[in-house]
């Protein structure tokens, strides 16, 4: 199979206009910094659509900067691997990075510097190639990773990214990414492509997830700032243990095990293998835990830089408020005061490729199981009859029954749920749903992030 040409590419690299990247730039942008501005065509087009915007461009090529200066408010020649970015003054509410990070030796350094150049509500709009594309896998398997003049294996690329590694890189620099758009190629109907899909399934990935990863050519990301200044709040930071049920060691190794957020607070990580339910996994880990706070986390959760400090700080605030009996989550649902009988989303997580960002909550009625914290003295307990699903929602309901009001807490910590599932609920989920409804016979409906559960809907599903 022949390597495809990048959809955003032109005959001359510096003359290209990436329309999907253009569409990802907020139309409200007031002061824009574009890194890798080439001939300035992107900024020129944006300023034609939004004349009030001020646009600065940076490129390593003197010829490109000379051309860009005809269209932009200011254009500078800088080597972004070594330049002092303080010359850019700051105050940018949008930063555009088109096909640049893969050319840098230290993209992390640049992203960290951009944090200080952006306003509090700054956004990054970025285009990145996916080195997990099938055309690259083909060369790896063939044992010939020869570089090209352009494309995914451009000979000037020095860093490689896939969606997960790109998300981790942004998160560790204080930016919360969201996959806004993408350039894709349909997988060819070849024997090689079929066998690669079989290999992905053997690794534990659903076919749908593998097809998405292998067909993705370029990512269009929009990133929001995470307020790192929140880590300076006064108050105690408490230690915590992390309990991780493991059945795919490679997934644990790539996520929890190498999480800088856990390393920065020296969190205790306890792996549990062979557990038959979430309750069994937690009980096994809790027996070995050194700390009063225990976080039960999926093996595919990544704790980015700063998240450990934030978690220790926010658990300390919960403890100081005397709420150690409440279950603690990171994303869930709470009653919506504006719509009685309805719920609204709460919490913060980067879920696969989607940024889920909502205010924290002090009264959740449901939470996701990807990460849940319980104190040693908590009065609620994971129900073994629920298996691996909906047990966190049950913890919320247990706490609500005891307090006569919702008291489950949802924190504001940017975790990355690096899941590989295909957004399909397994049969075991419905078994857990029936067990949950049987446990609360007087409750007509149950709000969950997977949708509302009702007895009528479950009965209809069983009849279907």
Image (cartoon, rainbow, N blue to C red):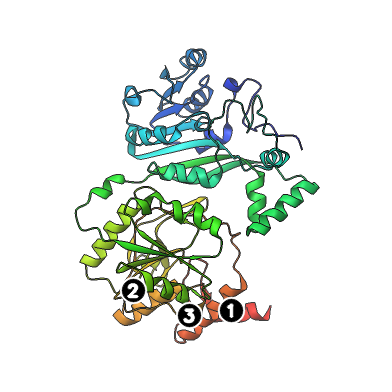
Task: Tell me: residue 314, above or below residue 128.
Answer: below
Q: Mark 3 vs mark 1: which is more N-terminal?
A: 3
Residue 211 place in picture, x, y as percent: 67, 51
Q: Is residue 401 above or below residue 2?
A: below
The one of 192 and 366 positioned closer to us in this rendering: 192
54 on left or right of 130: left
3 or 1: mark nearer the eye: 3
- Residue picked out by circle 1: 458
Q: Pointer 3 and pointer 2: residues touching (CB < 8 Å)? A: no
Looking at the picture, tell me which residue is in the foreground, 198 or 428.
198
Res 98 seen here: yes
Q: Determine which residue is flagged by label 2.
A: 406
Q: Residue furthest left?
A: 234
Q: Residues within 10 Å of mark 2 (few under 14, many from 20)?
A: many
Residue plotted at (46% across, 27% down): 35
* Mark-to-mark CA distance, 3 and 2: 22 Å
Residue occupying image coordinates x 69% and y 54%: 199
**Residue bearing the label numbered 3:** 384
Q: Secondary structure at mark 2?
A: loop
Number of marks in the image? Answer: 3
- State the CA–CA distance, disc 1 to disc 2: 25 Å
Circle 3 Cα neighbour tier, 10 Å, few/some/many (<14 / 14–19 / ≥20): some
Element marked by disc 3:
helix
Q: Quadrant of the N terminus?
A: top right
Of the two numbered discs 1 and 2 on the same chain, state the one appearing first in sequence. 2
Residue 18, percent across and down?
57, 31
Element at label 1: helix
Q: Residue at x 75, y 34 (%)?
A: 2
């Amino acid at each position: 199979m022949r390597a495809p040409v990048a959809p955003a590419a032109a005959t001359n690299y510096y003359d290209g206009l990436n329309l999907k990247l253009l569409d990802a730039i907020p139309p409200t942008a007031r002061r824009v910094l574009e890194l890798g501005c080439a001939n300035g065509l992107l900024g020129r087009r944006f300023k034609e659509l939004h004349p009030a915007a001020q646009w600065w461009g940076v490129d390593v090529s003197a010829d490109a900067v000379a051309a860009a200066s005809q269209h932009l408010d200011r254009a500078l020649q800088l080597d972004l691997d070594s330049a002092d970015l303080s010359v850019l003054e700051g105050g940018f509410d949008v930063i555009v990075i088109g096909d640049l990070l893969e050319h840098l030796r230290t993209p992390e350094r640049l992203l960290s510097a951009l944090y200080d150049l952006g306003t509090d509500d700054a956004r990054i709009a970025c285009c990145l190639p996916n080195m997990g594309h099938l055309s690259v896998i083909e060369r790896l398997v063939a044992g010939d990773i020869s570089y090209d003049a352009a494309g995914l294996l451009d000979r000037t690329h020095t860093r490689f990214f896939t969606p997960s590694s790109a998300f981790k890189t942004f998160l560790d620099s204080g930016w919360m990414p969201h996959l806004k758009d993408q350039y894709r190629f349909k997988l060819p109907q070849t024997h090689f492509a079929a066998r690669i899909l079989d290999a992905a399934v053997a690794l534990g990935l659903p076919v749908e997830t593998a097809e998405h990863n292998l067909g993705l050519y370029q990512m269009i990301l929009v990133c929001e700032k995470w307020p790192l200044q929140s880590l300076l709040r006064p108050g105690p930071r408490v230690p915590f243990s992390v309990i991780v049920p493991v059945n795919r060691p490679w997934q644990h190794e790539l996520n929890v095990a190498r999480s800088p957020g856990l390393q920065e607070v020296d969190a205790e990580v306890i792996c549990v293998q062979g557990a038959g339910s979430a309750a069994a996994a937690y009980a096994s880990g809790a027996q070995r835990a050194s700390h009063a706070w225990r976080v039960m986390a999926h093996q595919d959760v990544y704790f980015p830089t700063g998240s450990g400090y934030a978690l220790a700080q926010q658990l300390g605030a919960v403890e100081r408020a005397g709420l150690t009996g409440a279950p603690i989550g990171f994303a869930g649902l709470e009653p919506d005061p504006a719509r009685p009988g309805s719920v609204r989303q709460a919490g913060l997580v980067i879920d696969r490729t989607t940024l889920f960002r909502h205010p924290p909550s002090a009264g959740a009625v449901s939470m996701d199981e990807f990460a849940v914290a319980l104190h040693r003295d908590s009065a609620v307990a994971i129900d073994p009859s629920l298996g691996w699903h909906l047990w966190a929602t049950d913890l919320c309901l247990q706490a609500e029954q005891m307090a006569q009001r919702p008291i489950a807490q949802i924190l504001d910590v940017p975790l990355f749920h690096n899941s590989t599932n295909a957004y399909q609920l397994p049969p075991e989920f419905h078994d857990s749903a029936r067990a949950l409804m049987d446990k609360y016979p007087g409750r007509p409906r149950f709000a969950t992030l997977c949708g509302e559960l009702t007895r009528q809907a479950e009965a209809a599903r069983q009849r279907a």
